[in-house]
């Protein structure tokens, strides 16, 4: 009788482990699922063919606890970028974007969605762009890709990556983005804390002139 009871308890425990995964792992899985790539691969590949790698630094801090949806922000190009339509974006060009969403999630964590929309040259000329955030690195690694700490900086876009789901991308926050997605990238807190990006945060991008067949959905 005792053996049967032990067996029953063991079976119940195994069932709980099988169907009730670790909450932290579940939260991470849900975060990835929330921002999975909903853009058809063919569309993403077509968009990627028009994009080039770029690096920039955030010109101001962005705190999901205080910034509001619709607020503008800027990042500065670290190097000159030549778009595939022939437009040249010199080093120091301002990439201007808006905060798309800054809401608290049901599990108590927060999210901050960013969307780059245009590049403003020093002479005042504005170039409509679309960009996908490929990676980020903290500001302490430097404000430019000068080779002083190349391993610490986010890698340049290689032209092949279409979806980014980087857990713990920076300061305990996850990054989710997709080529041809609605937003440039979405940051989600990995624990119950609001998302905050410091000024001079390094950003690796895939960038293209705006106006191609970008679809809704994605990150």
Image: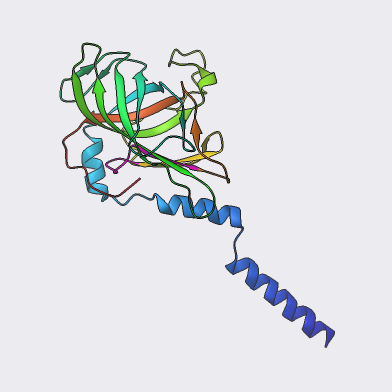
Report the residue at 31% width, 30% height from top.
Answer: 97
Q: Which residues are magenta?
A: 178-188
Q: Is residue 136 above or below residue 188?
A: above
Q: Is residue 22 visible?
A: yes
Residue at the spot 19% in from the left edge and 33% down from the top edge: 210
| Residue 166 is a magenta residue | no
Looking at the rendering, in which quadrant would you find the N terminus? bottom right
Locate residue 155: give its quadrant: top left
- The percent coordinates of residue 64 (x first, y second) are 47, 37
Q: Position of residue 85 (x, y in %)?
A: 15, 25
Residue 21 percent across, percent down from the top left? 59, 61
Residue 14 sits above or below residue 101 on the image? below
The residue positioned 63% from the left and 73% from the top of the image is: 15
Viewer-nearest residue: 203 or 72:
72
145 or 30, nearer to the observer: 30
The quadrant in which the C terminus is found is top left
Q: Is residue 81 left or right of residue 146?
A: left
> How many labels, in total?
0
Q: Residue furthest bottom?
A: 1
Give how far across and how far down residue 14 sits, in percent.
Answer: 67, 71
Q: Is residue 185 magenta?
A: yes
Res 156 seen here: no
Left or right? Give the position of 193 relative to 70: right
Quarter location, residue 119:
top left
User: In the image, is 197 to the left or to the right of 193?
Assistant: left
Looking at the image, the residue that sits furthest to the right is: 2
| Scheme of colours in the image | rainbow
Up-down: is 205 above or below 59?
below
Query: Between residues 111 and 154, which one lies in front from this camera angle?
Result: 111
């Amino acid at each position: 009788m005792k053996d049967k009871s032990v067996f029953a308890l063991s079976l119940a425990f195994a069932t709980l482990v099988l169907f009730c995964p670790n909450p932290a792992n579940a939260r991470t899985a849900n975060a990835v699922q929330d921002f999975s790539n909903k853009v058809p691969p063919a569309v993403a590949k077509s968009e990627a063919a028009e994009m080039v790698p770029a690096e920039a630094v955030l010109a101001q801090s962005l705190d999901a606890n205080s910034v509001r949806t619709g607020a503008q922000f800027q990042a500065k190009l670290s190097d000159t970028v030549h778009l595939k339509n022939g437009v040249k974006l010199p080093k120091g060009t301002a990439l201007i974007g808006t905060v798309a969403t800054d809401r608290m999630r049901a599990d108590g964590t927060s999210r901050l969605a960013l969307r780059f929309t245009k590049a403003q040259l020093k002479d005042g000329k504005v170039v409509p762009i679309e960009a996908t955030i490929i990676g980020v690195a903290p500001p302490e690694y430097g404000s430019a890709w000068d080779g002083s700490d190349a391993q610490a900086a986010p890698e340049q876009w290689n032209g092949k990556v279409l979806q980014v789901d980087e857990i713990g991308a920076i300061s305990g926050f996850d990054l989710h983005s997709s080529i041809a997605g609605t937003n440039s990238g979405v940051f989600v807190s990995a624990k119950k804390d609001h998302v905050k990006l410091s000024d001079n945060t390094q950003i690796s991008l895939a960038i293209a002139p705006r106006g191609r067949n970008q679809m809704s959905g994605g990150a």
